[in-house]
Image (cartoon, coloured by chain):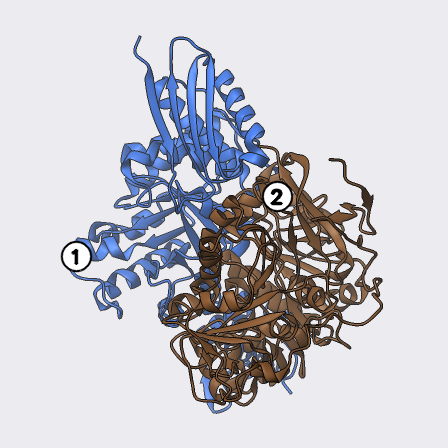
Amino acid sequence: MAINTVINAAGREVPLEINGEPVIPFKGVGKHRPEGRKYSSPIPTCADYPDDGNKVVGSLEEALRRCGLRDGMTISTHHHLRDGDLISNRVFDLASEMGIRDLVWFPSASFPCNDPVIRYLEDGTINRIEGSMNGPLGRFVSEGKMKGTAVLRSHGGRVQAIQDGEVKIDIAVLAAPSADAFGNARGTGGSSACGVIGYAKADFMYAGKVIVVTDNLVDLPCFPMEIEGNYVDYVVVVDKIGIPEKIVSGTTQITKSPDRLLIAELTASFLEKSGILRDDVTIQAGAGGTSLAIAVFMHQIMKKRGWRSKFGFGGSTKYMVQMLEEGQMGYILDAQVFDLDSVRSIENNPNHVPYPVFNAYNYHSKGNLTSMMDIMILGATEVDLNFNGNVVTHSDGYLLHGIGGWQNCLHARNVIIPVPLFRDRIPVIVDRVTTLCGPGELIDVIITERGIAINPLRQDLIDSVKGSGLPLKTIEELKYEADKICGQPQKPEFEEDIVAAIKWVDGTIIDVVKKLKL
Amino acid sequence: MENLLAVAGNAGPKVRSDCEISLEIRSGGGIEIELVSRVKALYGESIKNEIFSILSFYGIENAVVRINDSGALPFVISARMEAAIRQLQKTDLEYLPGLIPENCYSTERDRFRFARLYLPGNTPGLMLNAGLHLAEGIILDLEDSVAPQKKDEARILVRNALRNVNFYGAERMVRINQGARGLEDLSYVIPHNVNLILIPKCESAANVIEVDNEIFRLKKRHGQAGNVYLMPIIESALGVENSFEIARASENVVAIAIGLEDYTADLGVPRSAGGNESFYARTRLVVAAKAAGIQPIDSVFSDVGDMDGLLENVKVSKSLGFEGMGCIHPRQIQVIRQGFSPGPDEIEKSRKIVQAFETARQQGLGVVAVGTKMIDPPVVARAQKTLDLAIRLGLLDPDRINEVPA
């Protein structure tokens, strides 16, 4: 079947229709302005809910039946239980047993523990996934085996899609480490604590029906509540919502690789010498080994200079918590919690505050936290000569990662991408990214072990490090160096079929992923 | 005719940037290549083309080549192929990757040798970025870090690395094996612009002269002009006793190093943290080196997680007169360099001494004092050495020496 395509504002060929619905091609950063009013959930009536506030039902299956689970529905889940999640797969086990077909799974992210849903994609219980796809799931999609077309959104884009009605969640199934019988819930307490459950915010507010699943039923009120019981239809109590050691790391660790440490040192040094790192700075860095090392090196510099960060935005880790506790960070605003030290901190420290991506990354919000961040440390699988970035596919064409908050974070004041120049012979800097996830105009600095390339659009940054002794190169020079070492790679070959659509933060289509020629 | 089978290289879940090649030469059937690689989609064609051209270089027309690749660079693939072929064919033909212009430098006799990083000679993944950590020297090791059955293939890999890996200006060193094998090793590295050869377990001047003569012969044969320096490693009681003779055995000897693991084993005592058991050997080696006008270099510090311990160790080492130390992890490099460099207080004190001496000399005074301390000429000489070192390291502006401190 021929599909109508156009070239979008980023120069990528994209379709005008995905999964039978019309879609809007990317128009440029900040250009798309939808009109009308936000989508909303159906009007409930309190008379339909128990006066004693007890919404506990016998089982998840009963809750799903009462929610009217049927073919073609959209089911949402959150990923705060990460690789220890026992609930998402269970939903589809039950749906399959009930003979339901063509569901759309709308997770905030998926993890290796979700690989078993591949069998439900194969048997037709699930039509498609609209969310991140990692490992074997990504492989399955890239090889064209999923019935529907995958839609990949950023964390903020997911909120946008819910708010403007692009995605209508029929049933949200929300695992909660602690909940009361009315449905108030939070991310702390019990044996499956994950710190916060902010990714579920848009889900519980906008879904048709909301089920809270907990293994730690507490007396009302479950306080401080992140999920508000007034939005909740049913509460289900199970033995275990997750496997604790897979939910949070016992402890996150900085990288031990001398090459990654070199990149981290170079990054911290760049931030100091450019003046980006200073007193009152706002910081966001990830939980990967290199990012953690950068946080440690920044912390050392700030201590030495007597500087204090106004606030940091989590994913929190023990390294951020150390900054908070030793006085180099005023507050941690937190969207997710990565290790036990951070769980302890958010439970006990009033300056460690839950802050959902709903409020930080949302295109339909009246301003966002991300644009107020001075330092944003991000990763990428590929960056091209125009500083465009790719985070979802590898250079071999396989879809292997979700977007996460990456696109949203690009709106920070200084976006820094520390990456090795090549990984196992595969160059990171390419002529043109395999899949475009973020436009180069938003990416400021690429830091590799062999040099630093600053986006020519940021003349101010280029000027700020003149004569600093830092190894400054153009991105072309870096690419030349990598190609000289690795050799010019050949390009993967694709079929015509689109297997995944990549959404920009505003809901427009920035690029697509095509089926690999095998 | 029976098919011949050879295997070279490394594969496994933890192996990176390497490949294992199994080569079967057969009597007919042409060339067959089976490639398993995580970079197949990007470099599959390039790898196969490389294999074809190597086979054709060696005149092999019928073979099955199985490659298990974890992102090996071309110089690694060709080293593994050549190693496999050499197991099956007696040949002197070398399939050489290009000598990159960045590696065509020679080094100075008296350059700093604070930190020199050991790299196992058969582990390509550790070689690629080694130069980025800015050690004064990189040692490609053919001796103790290479398993006996891998010695032959390591030579070829090291040769290719010397030609093809950019070490960013580090002194490019090779530690050869002992004895006859070590002399054979030389023919694989001398023609490829190696800067320095480490002679392990050196016990006599004769050990040095034998290596030096072979290098001379090889250089002449290949028409090479550049210097190849020598650094004997003393690792036994006999070596310690002969250290002065070793230090001046050839004008190419620029440093002598001590290897304490083997030395303490030779004494039959455990190696302690304080190092009392090797105190004599270390000071003896320092004296021998200074007497011969070369650099004394200390043993490696083997706990790569203990940076504080390393720094303490370096301080002791420097106080004994050593001018450098081996390292086995890139993170040790900066600590070692920092430890051997003069600190700000030391530089300032030296500056005051030299300045006071100059003032006294100009005023024709016989006695020099800084504060209440009397300064003898050797103290001035030592202070001057510290200032020279600081200037060479870029820690002190030569124009600032005579400034009056604020």
Q: Quadrant of the image for the N terminus of chain A?
A: top right
The chain that appears blue in the image is B
As drawn, A423 above or below A322 = above
Relative vertical location of residue B345 with respect to residue B292 in this rendering, above or below: below
Q: Does the image show residue A469? A: no
The chain under label 2 reads A
Which kind of residue does numbered mark 1 sit on?
Leu
Pick the front one: A283 or B392: A283
Residue drawn at x 39%, y 55% is B328
Q: Quadrant of residue A329?
A: bottom right
Looking at this view, is A260 or A314 the one in front? A314
As drawn, the chain in brown is A
Q: Is residue A16 left or right of residue B225?
A: right
Neighbours of disc 2 within 10 Å: few (<14), some (14-19), many (20+): many
Viewer-closest of B1 and A86: A86
Q: Residue furthest left?
A: B268
Instruction: Name the amino acid, label 2.
Output: Ser
Q: Could you say where residue B266 lies in the image, as x and y percent from the top left?
A: 18, 53
Identify the secondary structure beneath mark 1.
helix
Is the C-beta separation of discs 1 and 2 under 8 Å?
Answer: no
Identify the residue position indicated by label 2 in the image.
Answer: A395
Q: Is residue A193 visible?
A: yes
